[in-house]
């Protein structure tokens, strides 16, 4: 391509959010020097607007063991990355406002316990005792003590900086446009960097587009049934902490957590 710049990389990661930067870090730590392509700035999309829950509770069974293993990593992550991600293992409460929801949570708990995740199901009285700050609207809950919270922006940057130290390259304002394939094998990624064409020769592409999975998948020539959804997040004025848990309710379609 006339006027284009060509680079080489052992792996290209599309997306500079938490997943993309964490992938870059772990690849670089193993001796591979990946290239991350982020169309905006690091953590500018969903990773910078996440609620920050770190949980295995209420996961799809197909991802539950992965989530449980992830929490083991989180427990030592600040030390490993030399960065304060504001991670706190303060517990996770999933609330029930109806008998139907409480029955659903109880059924989920049986499956979670069978998979090795330690959870508790609380009735109304137990919920009042354990979380007195909640209203009487809720009749029970499911609880996991090993779940917690972290600052998603800080966590993303912690992985990004650690990845760079380990040998990864992060290119911001660089959008993947097309993936080159020959004989069923990936050969390159075509991107645009501030309006200029960029070709990266690589045998490996890792898709970490997050909420924009369907858009990024078009670059790969496939369609995935993932669409972004808008949530509203409000931050209160600072107040004295009175709870530590990540709290959520599907019935009320809300969640909240403490922050530093």
Image (cartoon, grey):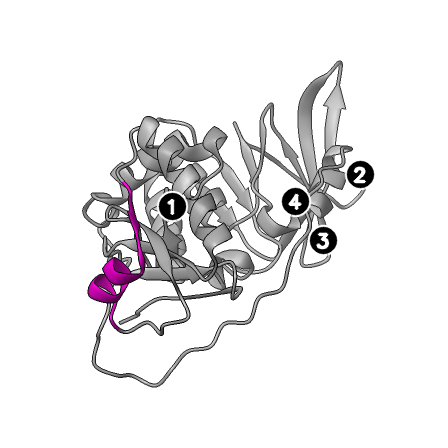
The residue drawn where x is 32% and y is 71% is: 134
SS class, disc 2? loop
- Classify the position of the N terminus by image quarter: top right
SS class, disc 4? helix
The residue drawn where x is 69% and y is 50% is: 227
Whole-angstrom CA distance, mark 4 to mark 3, is: 24 Å
62 in the magenta segment = no
Q: Identify the disc placed on residue 1.
A: 2
First in sequence: mark 4 vs mark 2:
2
The residue drawn where x is 21% and y is 62% is: 130
List x then y, in percent, for residue 63: 46, 33
Q: Which residues are magenta?
A: 119-132
Tell me which corner region of the image, top left, top right, bottom left or bottom right, holds residue 93. Answer: bottom left
- Residue 178 makes an appearance in the image: no
Q: Identify the disc placed on residue 155.
A: none
First in sequence: mark 1 vs mark 4:
1
Tell me which corner region of the image, top left, top right, bottom left or bottom right, holds residue 155. Answer: bottom left
First in sequence: mark 2 vs mark 1:
2
**96 vs 15: above or below:** below
SS class, disc 3? strand
Determine contact: label 3, label 2, CB under 8 Å.
no
First in sequence: mark 4 vs mark 3:
3
């Amino acid at each position: 391509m006339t006027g284009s710049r060509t680079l080489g990389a052992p792996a290209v990661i599309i997306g500079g959010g938490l997943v993309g930067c964490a992938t870059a870090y772990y690849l670089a730590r193993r001796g591979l020097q990946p290239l991350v392509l982020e169309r905006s700035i690091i953590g500018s999309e969903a990773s910078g607007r996440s609620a920050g829950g770190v949980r295995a509770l209420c996961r799809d069974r197909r991802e539950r063991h992965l989530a449980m293993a992830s929490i083991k990593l989180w427990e030592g992550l600040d030390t490993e990355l030399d960065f304060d991600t504001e991670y706190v293992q303060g517990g996770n409460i999933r609330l029930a406002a109806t008998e139907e929801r409480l029955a659903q949570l109880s059924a989920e708990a049986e499956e979670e316990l069978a998979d090795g995740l330690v959870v508790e199901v609380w009735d109304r009285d137990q919920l009042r005792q354990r979380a007195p700050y909640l209203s009487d609207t809720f009749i029970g809950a499911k609880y996991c003590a090993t779940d917690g919270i972290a600052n998603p922006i800080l966590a993303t940057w912690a992985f990004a900086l650690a990845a760079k130290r380990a040998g990864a390259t992060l290119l911001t304002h660089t959008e993947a446009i097309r993936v080159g394939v020959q004989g069923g094998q990936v050969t390159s990624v075509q991107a645009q960097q501030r309006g200029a064409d960029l070709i990266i020769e690589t045998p490996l592409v890792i898709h970490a587009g997050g909420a924009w999975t369907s858009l990024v998948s078009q670059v790969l020539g496939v369609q995935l049934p993932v669409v972004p959804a808008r949530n509203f997040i409000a931050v209160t004025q600072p107040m004295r902490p009175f709870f530590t848990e990540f709290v959520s309710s599907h019935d009320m379609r809300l969640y909240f957590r403490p922050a530093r």
